[in-house]
Image (cartoon, grey):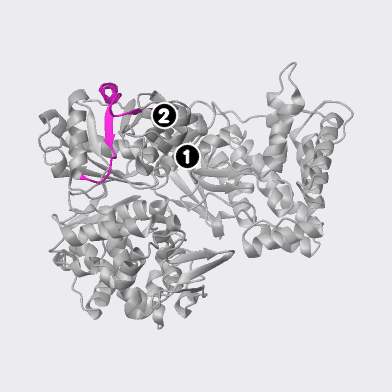
Amino acid sequence: MKRIIKKVAVVGSGIMGSGIACHLANIGLEVLLLDIVPNTLTEAEEKKGLSLESKEVRNRIVNNHLANALKSKPSPIYHPKFANRITTGNTTDDLSKIASCDWIIEVVVERLDIKKLVFEQIDKFRKPGTLVTSNTSGIPIHFMSEGRSEDFQAHFCGTHFFNPARYLKLFEIIPGPKTNPEVLDFLTEYGSKFLGKTSVVAKDTPAFIGNRIGIFGIQSLFHLVKEMGLTVEEVDKLTGPVIGRPKSATFRTVDVVGLDTLVHVANGLYENCPNDEAHELFQLPDFISKMMENNWLGSKTGQGFYKKEGKDILSLDLNTLEYRAAKKASFATLELTKTIDKPIDRFKVLVKGKDKAGEFYRKNFAAMFTYCSNRIPEISDDFYKIDDAMKAGFGWENGPFEIWDAIGVANGIELMKTEGYEPAAWVTEMIASGSTSFYSVKEGATYYYNIPSKSQAKVPGQDAFIILNNIRESKKVWSNSGAVIQHLGDGILNLEFQSKMNTIGGDVLQAINKAIDLSEKEYNGLVIGNQGANFSVGANIGMIFMMAVEQEYDELNMAIKLFQDTMMRVRYSATPVIVAPHGMTLGGGCEMTMHADRVVAAAETYIGLVEFGVGVIPGGGGSKEMALRASDLFHKNDVELNVLQEYFLTIGMAKVATSAYEAFDLGILQKGKDIVVVNKDRQIATAKQIALQMAEQGYTQPMQRKDVKVLGKQALGMFLVGTDQMQAGKYISEHDQKIANKLAYVMAGGDLSEPTLVSEQYLLDIEREAFLSLCTERKTLERIQFMLTKGKPLRN
């Protein structure tokens, strides 16, 4: 049957329930969020003369929880207006309203008796065929639906979102004993397509997949730390970005999540997995028990493995359990990987290290490979689901079996044997069957070793995706050191940046021009997109700094002109150019996005013109483009200065949208033209589809604009008075004022005596002149140098 989800009820409004409600609202659903009725009045309610029967009191718990969620950072919602899609209520007065819902998600306290009472009530009011799921992270699913109606049991399963629900991509689906397979198929597809998640069907085993492996990994580390005498800082250095894990690595992550949360899951695994070969590992080491006694739970109690005192960050000595000044961790083995860009390519080097780091990685990976291989078929029949779960739920760039492949399956087995482990029988059988790796790539698709058939099978669900890693070499049309052009099929090219942090320098500009040349001569359209952590952090400011310091102003002028001309080629190509931003899309990355025919943005796109932070104005067409977009909004009898001021402030305050939806408010994305996709994995495929559609409908090269209305002295005077007042009030520095005045000159179109229609090229020329003049300023060079060395803006 065809199932459409329009309205969802979330029962339980704590941190997790409110987070899930917000993410459902993010994708456009109507949400009913319910919680219990309080049984006492607060002092404030008594003073207001309210009673326990007042609606305000009865909905206090749910309203407070939702308000706290909406105030939290990072925000659980793509745009403040989306919160209007959530209606609150309580389970006493409003549970009957679930009859109009298509999906009911239970997120109440982790106690089976309470959950069963909630399901008994839900069963009375839900309409037949409605999905009912539990967001439990540990209670067995098969206990929950006992005694419920047949229709309830057929439409019931676990749907485990990871916290925070907006940002973590793992969506575990756990069938109950009588769950209809159609329900699992639907939720798998819905999770991927609409919720933007990595859907993983897990077995009904303790902690499912993500937490079973994740908690094993952390507990294993806790024991290894003591065994090897490592410090908190050393472990965080070894288990962070160097191996493709989040910056918070291990101990900082535990501080953020809360030690009590981790201990709760570890205790559950110790109690519920008596036959697990690593059973004793789930027992808490002494230092963890002591931290629990001391209530050192992390951020929520002000101290955990780290503690902030004034401006200093102290770290916990695990032997003395006293805080001390943090010590910088360094290892010779890590130095050897500095020239290796991709974490997946570092593992071979790391496990061969001759120092403590090498020993740590050998012990750590040997234990992880053994544990994960032994969990098949207990927690999943397919090992790729373990990799998917760890990448989506814990932010690992590569899953355990991908890392094992990178080291080499045979080498991984050697590591295991050296540490006293044996691989699972199926791994030995895999090698005996002639498969030397867990994964392979054929014709742009990823295949995995299928254990029952003892052969390579295609990983399901890839048809909606284009995975650039899989086609980079086989479909390569052209490349240089900064970018690669691939053919996506159907005459559509893709340009993928491969510079550090996808910065835009000479190589990338050359590649953009080459890609447009190829598209115009031999192909039908171009997508500019990549699948790195971020789309682009902007222009290569190191190159600009060197030219400015050497006073090579002619070369710098030519470099800026090349950047501008390239952006204009993106805008005025003879074939459609689609830009697909995601993650950080700053400065030049934002300028490129603004010059595309269409933008296909990932919902998680943090985009803005941030050049003020390094002492310049947007010089790659960004200042021009903001003036042009303001001009397009001028309507008869409007106060045109107000419109222009909005766009001026977007640049002047270096505003960055915290989601693609916010970028529409800033005028960076355009309504009715640009689109947002929730699942980043589908972004390149969607962009290709739009490029193809535009080409097939008969794309005509646009004409360059000569009708941009600029307001001249009228606007310039207003801006200069404004910046003067800001500086006099000490809101901005003298140098900030100088930069703002340069931007004002560009966006006003110079000091023309009256409003005038000008060309884009006119604006680009004065933009470039302003940018260059700022590059001659000592304070701008100080800002650029500070950004290059410290990675953050300087206020001088």
| Highlighted range, magenta | 87-111
Q: Which residue is mark 2?
A: 28
Image quadrant occupied by the N terminus = top left
Residue 205 percent coordinates (x, y): 17, 52
Tag 2's secondary structure?
loop
User: Residue flagged by tag 2: what amino acid is it?
Assistant: Gly
Left or right placement of residue 378 versus residue 9 in this view? left
Q: Is residue 123 magenta?
A: no
At a point 24% along the width and 75% down the height, the residue shown is: 416
Asked if the residue at tag 2 contacts the one at tag 1, i.e. Cβ–Cβ closer than 8 Å, the answer is: no
Task: Say above or below: 722 vs 324.
Answer: above
Q: Which residue is mark 1?
A: 603
At a point 52% along the width and 35% down the height, the residue shown is: 661
Residue 63 percent coordinates (x, y): 42, 33
User: Which mark is first along the chain, 2 or 1?
Assistant: 2
Residue 662: quarter of image: top right
Tag 1's secondary structure?
loop
User: Residue flagged by tag 1: what amino acid is it?
Assistant: Ala
